[in-house]
Amino acid sequence: METVRGRLKGFTISLWLMLGLLVAFTACFTAYVRAEGQIKRTHETRYQALLLAEQLLQSSDDLTTAARLYVATGNPMFRTRHQDILDVRDGKKPRPIEYRHDYWDLLHPGLSSQAETGPAAPLLELIGRAGFTEPEMAQLALAKTNSDALSQIEVAVMATIELVDPSIEARRATALTRLNDAAYLAAKAAVMRPISEFNRMAHTRTLLVVQTAERDATGIRNLLVVLGLLALLLLWRVHTGLQAILGGSPQHLYMWMARLGRGEVLTSIPVPNDRADSVLGWLSKMQTSFAGLELHQFKAIVNSTDDAIVGKTLEGTITSWNASAERIFGYRADEAIGQSMRLLIPPDRQNEEVGILARIAAGERVEHFETVRRRKDGQLIDVSVAISPIIDGRGQVIGASKIVRDITERKRTDDLLREHNILLARQKVELELALGRVSRLEGLISMCMYCKKIRTENDWHQLERYLTEHSDAVFSHGLCPDCYEREMKKVTKKATRKTT
């Protein structure tokens, strides 16, 4: 029992460790998911930073393009576009939902925009919602301020060619020069530098966050691998512990429990030597106890029956011999066991055993049939035999069980009754013939109502004598049907007493 308690204690500890490992695995997996989410969110932040900075840069480029096109062509659409770009950036007009870098390039002269718009929002406000740091926001605000200053230069340049007069071409040439000279390009660079610094700062910050999150995710992932390996080890330990406690697999244990439940208690349960102190080992001990009880009861039934019960192999060798077999055949058990069944068979019936063994080997039952067998003293006896195959746990025929009943007395009684019936039938025929020869008597005849004697003038006479003297009848003694039935009952009763 100490071994079993140790196994149960180890099994319980393994289960608790498995539970703790499951909790740790769940916590690590949750942390891993959060780390991966942080990496994803950081990448999204980097993308949003680049996108918003790109919008600020693109709006400055779009303003420059619109101003130069207006100065070069004088088309008022481009001045209007210049103002629309400023209004969208400052939140004075709704922002197109698909506000990409090619948005204004797709607007041809004479066509109005059909793009779907969202709510109006200043670009700096959208940038502020993205969660950038103060230094990063300061760079974008500086770029926006410089871009606004540049746009004022562009507005002033465009105003110089509004008046159409002979000097318009000279003024247009001057305006185009101002939009491309060193001062303008320096102002343009003043817009680009803060945006570039913003990109550098956002990239450095988000890259550090990404690297930290990736390092954390890698560590957690490695920890999950270690926990998974430990879980496999614990699962194997739980499996082996359960096998040791049960004595085998649950399916194997269930199979034997089901067989015991069906009453198959004579088949031994194989248990390894190191699993004797297990559930399967205890089940095997219980099966052995049940088998002992059943065999004890079976032996008691076998030894108390009046019929001979004999076990034999497929070769006809006797393996078991009960007390009635000893009484019927005269051989003791130690004399019969190990001998061939042919010991009991008369020489003229030896072929019977060959056919019987063939049918038993094929799994057939041999129903009751009557034959003759020989006792130890050489006396032949009439018997009734029934034979059934003995099948092992694998369904293989390993022998036969034979039930032999001595019917010698019964056969003798049957012969006696048969001879008596023949005799009575013969006497009945003779009586009927004799009565046919009796002369007819006439007149009043006095007869005793008790002894059936007939009164004459001188004396009382027996019926048979009177008929003999007063007729031509010749008597042969027989039995009437009533007397026949009465005598048959007496004979049968007497024969039954002799048999018992």
Image (cartoon, rainbow, N blue to C red):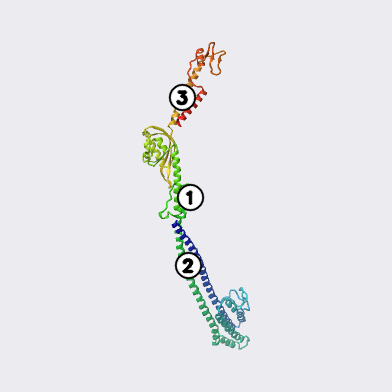
Front-most of residues 235 and 495: 495
Residue 80 coordinates in the image, percent (x, y): 62, 80
Give me the C-alpha separation between circle 2 and circle 1: 42 Å
Q: Mark 2 vs mark 1: which is more N-terminal?
A: 2
In the picture as drawn, the residue positioned furthest to the front comes out as 2
Residue 494 coordinates in the image, percent (x, y): 47, 28
Q: Is residue 91 above or below residue 287?
A: below
Q: Mark 3 vs mark 1: which is more N-terminal?
A: 1
Front-most of residues 260 and 322: 322
Q: Secondary structure at mark 2?
A: helix
Residue 265 makes an appearance in the image:
no
Q: Secondary structure at mark 1?
A: helix
Comparing marks 2 and 1, which lies closer to the viewer? 1
Front-most of residues 435 and 468: 468
Q: Amino acid at mark 3?
A: Ile
Q: Residues within 10 Å of mark 2 (few under 14, many from 20)?
A: some
Q: Amino acid at mark 1?
A: Ala
Label 1, on which residue?
A: 258
Q: Is residue 51 above or below residue 495?
A: below
Label 3, on which residue?
A: 422
Q: Residues within 10 Å of mark 1 (few under 14, many from 20)?
A: few
Q: Amino acid at mark 2?
A: Leu
Residue 12 coordinates in the image, percent (x, y): 48, 60
Q: Secondary structure at mark 3?
A: helix
The numbered mark at residue 224 is 2
Could you tell me which residue is drawn at 47 percent across and 64 percent down? 231
Give me the C-alpha separation between circle 3 and circle 2: 103 Å
Residue 12 makes an appearance in the image:
yes
